[in-house]
Image: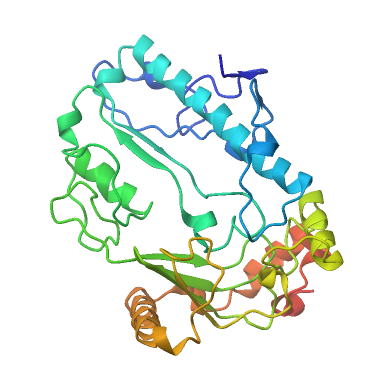
Amino acid sequence: DDYWTGPHEQKRFFGKQGHGSWNDRKAGQAFFGVIELFGGKSKLKAKVPVDPATIKVPPYYPDTPFQRQELANHYNQIKVTDVEVGQIIEQLKDDGLYKNTIIIFMSDNGYKTMRDKQFLYDGGTHMPLVIASPGNPKLLNQFGVREDMVSLMDITATSLSLAGIPIPSYMESKDIFAKDFKRDYVVSVRDRCDFTIDRIRSIRTKEFKYIKNFMTDRPLMQSQYRDIRKSYKMLMKTYKEGKVSFYSKWLEDERPAEELYDLANDPHEINNLAKDPNFNTKLVELRGYLNDWIAETGDKGQYPESKEQLKIIYERWGERCVNKEFDAVR
């Protein structure tokens, strides 16, 4: 009885040309399809919405009625997505494809809230990933919940492997069902998002998170596409008034060059250990992982964007482009 009300936003799988579905293919022809659901941008409503009073507010947000509703909205959209996925599953069954299809469910980011979406804390980078082969579960050779480190980039090599296609040696992507699959850490990156120019890198192991802020001359919450929204204005109002106690260091005008978090004891990434001498060995280790990755991959984020690219962004966003990099095209 827990479903949404409103018009259905996604009724079919559409091909790359914008039309057709898996039923339009030739008899016996294999297919690879991507269905993009609206997720947090959906306008549909859960029939049984989450009660904001039951929400556990992370300590880096103020515990206010508005913030509780923001988080409840997030969970309500998960309910909507759950129903949409169920409808897709039913369509596969109706079309006789369910037992012959490998299903991968994933998201492109975690919470859409201010400190999470577009940033490299776990709230933004910890994403759902579910893979199932209903008709041939032994194909995956894996069952239950896995706790190892996986990057969404690994979906590429995994898909190739499941389809019996060789994985190119140059790929960073790995087959997560291979017997020798192992990641000691996962790299996450942030560069320009919309018109906001930044450069952040992180190394995430099972126990620790290392973050490198390359642009410490600008606040974490520098001018961005959300700063005209009520969610941002309400957050900053609460912060400036100081009437509600919460971890607000991330809202300050300056940020550290390095951050290090003990995730087992500090899952919300609040206590920065980068300057704690007791964790210097771990800091040097993870910093080394990142430096090696930058050198090995030729990390393109270390180079400025072209004048032509910046001009395109400026033409779209205009005077909201306040970063100094736009001075050349302003």
**Residue at 22% in and 22% down:** 135
In this image, 295 relative to 310: left or right? left
Q: Is 302 or 21 nearer to us in this picture?
A: 302
Quarter of the image for residue 310 reads bottom right
* Residue 160 appearing in the image: yes
Q: Is 203 displayed left or right of 67 in the figure?
A: left
Q: Where is 136 relative to 153, above or below?
A: above
Q: Is residue 308 above or below residue 129?
A: below
Camera-nearest residue between 315 and 193: 193
- Total numbered labels: 0
| Residue lying at 36% horizontally and 66% vertically, measured from the top left | 207
Q: Is residue 113 above or below residue 328?
A: above
| Colour pattern of the rendering | rainbow
Image x and y of residue 151, in percent: 36, 55
> Which quadrant of the figure contains the C terminus?
bottom right
Q: Is residue 117 above or below residue 29?
A: below
Examine the rendering and report whether any part of residue 73 can be seen: no
Q: Residue furthest top?
A: 94
The quarter of the picture where the N terminus appears is top right
Residue 313, percent across and down?
69, 63
Residue 140 locus on image (x, y percent): 19, 37
The answer to whether 94 appears left or right of 175 in the picture is right
Residue 26 lies in quadrant: top left
**Residue at screen point 26% across, 37% down:** 144
> For the point 62% across and 61% down, which residue is it?
193
Q: How far from the left and from the top, in percent, is residue 56?
A: 61, 46
